[in-house]
Image (cartoon, rainbow, N blue to C red):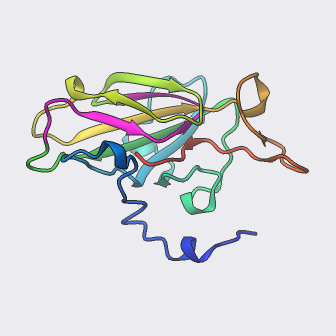
Amino acid sequence: MTLTTPWGADLDPESVLQEYPRPQLVRNSYLNLNGSWQYAITSARRDQAPADGDWDGQILVPFSPEAALSGVHRQLQPQQLLWYRRTVRLPAGFVDDRVLLHFGAVDQSCTVTVNGTQVGGHDGGYLPFSLDVTDALVPGAEQEIVVRVRDVSDTEYHSRGKQVLDRGGIWYTAQSGIWQTV
């Protein structure tokens, strides 16, 4: 059973959480990447993103695949990887002296590539992080962003709060992937 709140029912997939996430650091050139991304869940042994026709479908960012609002309704297992893909074209007039890609949070470990170049990664599911992607951008072209996520949940020792793979009692369903604004 899925419990939908009035806010969830009124959610516009074309305009998901578009407010500026860091009001104390407002920039003139800003592009919110919340919305529909391609996703795939693969074996953790796979070290390359799926080919163009091999993606599982669409996921609504910034909702984890376990959340009803994501549209996926699947729990990521420790032996699996969650892949995200999105293309974006920087708007005309976008100030591109240095271009930073900000993630509000990704649970739990991720690596990010832009146009096939690995630009960085992050471990830990609760803190925001930023990556300078300037050198990976192709001027005037559509940019491809791929995020690779692994979340081992409660099978290893790290901060996980009350998230477990087998929920019940005081424990709740583990959440993974991008779950805050990009």
Name the spot of residue 138 as percent of width and height, x first: 15, 32
Position of 80 with respect to 111 (left or right) is right
Q: Is residue 107 magenta?
A: yes
Say if 142 sits above or below 71 in the image: above
Q: Which residues are magenta?
A: 95-112
Position of 94 with respect to 106 (left or right) is left
Residue at 59% x, 77% y is 6
Say if 56 sits above or below 158 in the image: below
Does residue 164 show up? no
Residue at 37% x, 65% y is 15
Q: Quadrant of the C terminus?
A: top left
Say if 71 sits above or below 176 in the image: below
**Residue 97 quadrant:** top left
What count of labels does the image hold?
0
Say if 93 sits above or below 134 in the image: below
Taking the view exactly as shown, the residue that stands out farthest to the front is: 24
Residue at 59% x, 50% y is 65
Residue at 8% x, 47% y is 93
Q: Is residue 177 magenta?
A: no
Q: Quadrant of the N terminus?
A: bottom right
Name the spot of residue 39 as percent of width and height, x first: 48, 46
Does residue 95 show up? yes
Name the spot of residue 4 as percent of width and height, x first: 65, 72
Name the spot of residue 110 as percent of width and height, x first: 51, 29
Taking the view exactly as shown, the residue that stands out farthest to the right is: 169
Position of 82 with respect to 169 (left or right) is left
**Residue 163 quadrant:** top right
Q: Nearer the viewer, residue 3 or 53?
A: 3
Position of 83 with respect to 22 (left or right) is right
